[in-house]
Image (cartoon, rainbow, N blue to C red):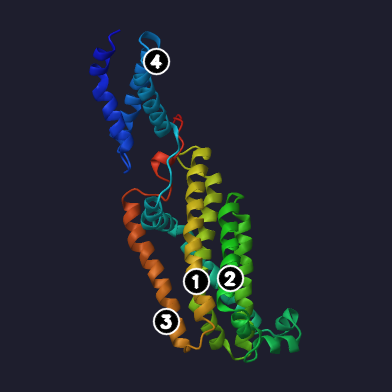
């Protein structure tokens, strides 16, 4: 075989392969296909050179080129800041918007339950005595008592971190264990609403409900919304096992599970903001109206983000799942 003729015939293909490998930006689908094709051809060229006309310089060049191409073709795609930006701009709001029909009713029913528990405790002294002894109740509800001191019991930064950790655990339980037909999710909701209802009832019976709401609302609006979103997503994940729709049960559970994992990352960021408010704003010396205004503004900003960015993403076909290139190949199934 004439090596010079062979090189002249295939030099353009090798140079194009090198050009594709030098690209820092993400390749298009056509470029990825071209890369695979050129990699296969160059590997064949290398094999032919080695067997028919071993040339040390050409063999070394093609060996390095094939190795780089193999790495580009077979190595998993690396995450980048672009992925993170796309997730918060498209994936996360789409996932929250898509599950609105699950978490919105969950929020309404949960808050109604908390209100009923609060009314029951606040209007029944015998129930209050079952919660704690009279002296303990006075310590909890008096000015500067346990309910108020709770928010200033630790330095703001460490308190915010502690709150974030506790809330993130509750959200994780809802998202991860939602696959158990949603039973753990209902338990987490019951515990949270019972705690909220007890606080409402006890402080209302002491004539200090306004103080309690002034402490809870600044951070509680965003915090409870995150819990409700996680709970609704967990319940939807559990229902997917019962009714996967037109997809196979495995495929449906995989898609919803991936979206739920992404939701955990997004809600962790939401809870971080809520924790900052609870650590720095709630115990601050700001007037009650100012603290509540900050909480309402944070809540409205999140809801607008979900409605605008999420609605636009869902209309564009986004579901909150990972990008198609990162999903495992789907196996065709009979309808």
Q: CA distance from mark 4 to mark 3?
A: 71 Å
Tell me the element at label 1: helix
Query: Which of the two discs, 3 and 1, labels the residue nearer the N terminus?
Result: 1
Residue under label 4, please give it.
Answer: 47
Q: Is residue 121 left or right of residue 214?
A: right
Closer-to-camera residue (170/248): 170
Closer-to-camera residue (107/255): 255
> Residue 111's quadrant in the figure?
bottom right
Residue under label 3, please give it.
Answer: 293
Residue ID at (39%, 50%): 83
Q: Position of residue 218 (x, y in %)?
A: 49, 78
Q: Position of residue 84 (x, y in %)?
A: 41, 54
Above or below for 120 versus 186 = below
Evaluate if marks 3 and 1 touch, with contact meaning CB atoms under 8 Å apart.
Answer: no
Residue under label 2, please give it.
Answer: 163
Residue 274 is labelled as 1
Tell me the element at label 4: helix
Q: CA distance from mark 4 to mark 1?
A: 61 Å
Evaluate if marks 2 and 1 touch, with contact meaning CB atoms under 8 Å apart.
Answer: yes
Evaluate if marks 4 and 1 touch, with contact meaning CB atoms under 8 Å apart.
Answer: no
Q: Nearer the viewer, mark 4 or mark 2?
A: 4
Query: Which of the two discs, 4 and 1, labels the residue nearer the N terminus?
Result: 4
Tell me the element at label 2: helix
Closer-to-camera residue (157/231): 157
Is residue 225 visible to us here? no
Query: Which of the two discs, 4 and 2, labels the residue nearer the N terminus?
Result: 4
Q: Position of residue 334 (x, y in %)?
A: 45, 29
Q: Is residue 262 left or right of residue 26?
A: right
Residue ID at (30%, 29%): 17
């Amino acid at each position: 075989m004439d090596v010079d003729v062979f090189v002249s015939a295939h030099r353009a293909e090798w140079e194009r392969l090198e050009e594709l490998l030098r690209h820092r930006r993400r390749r298009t689908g056509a470029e990825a296909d071209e890369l695979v094709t050129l990699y296969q051809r160059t590997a064949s060229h290398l094999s032919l050179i080695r067997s028919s006309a071993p040339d040390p310089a050409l063999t070394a060049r093609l060996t390095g080129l094939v190795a780089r191409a193999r790495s580009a073709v077979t190595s998993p795609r690396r995450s980048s800041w672009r992925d993170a930006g796309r997730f918060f701009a498209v994936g996360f709001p789409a996932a929250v918007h898509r599950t609105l029909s699950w978490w919105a009713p969950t929020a309404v029913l949960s808050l109604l339950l908390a209100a009923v528990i609060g009314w029951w405790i606040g209007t029944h002294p015998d129930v209050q005595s079952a919660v704690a002894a009279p002296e303990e109740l006075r310590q909890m509800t008096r000015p500067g008592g346990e309910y108020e001191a709770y928010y200033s019991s630790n330095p703001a930064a460490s308190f915010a971190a502690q709150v974030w950790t506790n809330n993130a655990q509750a959200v994780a339980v809802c998202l991860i264990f939602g696959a158990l037909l949603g039973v753990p999710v209902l338990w987490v909701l019951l515990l949270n609403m019972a705690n909220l209802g007890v606080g409402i009832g006890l402080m209302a019976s002491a004539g200090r409900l306004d103080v309690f709401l002034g402490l809870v609302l600044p951070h509680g609006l965003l915090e409870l919304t995150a819990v409700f979103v996680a709970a609704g997503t967990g319940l939807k994940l559990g229902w997917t096992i019962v009714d996967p729709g037109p997809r196979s049960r495995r495929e449906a559970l995989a898609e919803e599970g991936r979206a739920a994992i992404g939701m955990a990352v997004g809600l962790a960021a939401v809870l971080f903001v809520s924790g900052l408010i609870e650590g720095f704003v709630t115990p601050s010396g700001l007037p009650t109206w100012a603290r509540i205004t900050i909480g309402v503004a944070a809540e409205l900003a999140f809801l607008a983000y979900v409605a605008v960015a999420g609605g636009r993403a869902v209309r564009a076909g986004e579901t909150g799942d990972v990008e198609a290139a990162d999903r495992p190949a789907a196996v065709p199934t009979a309808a």
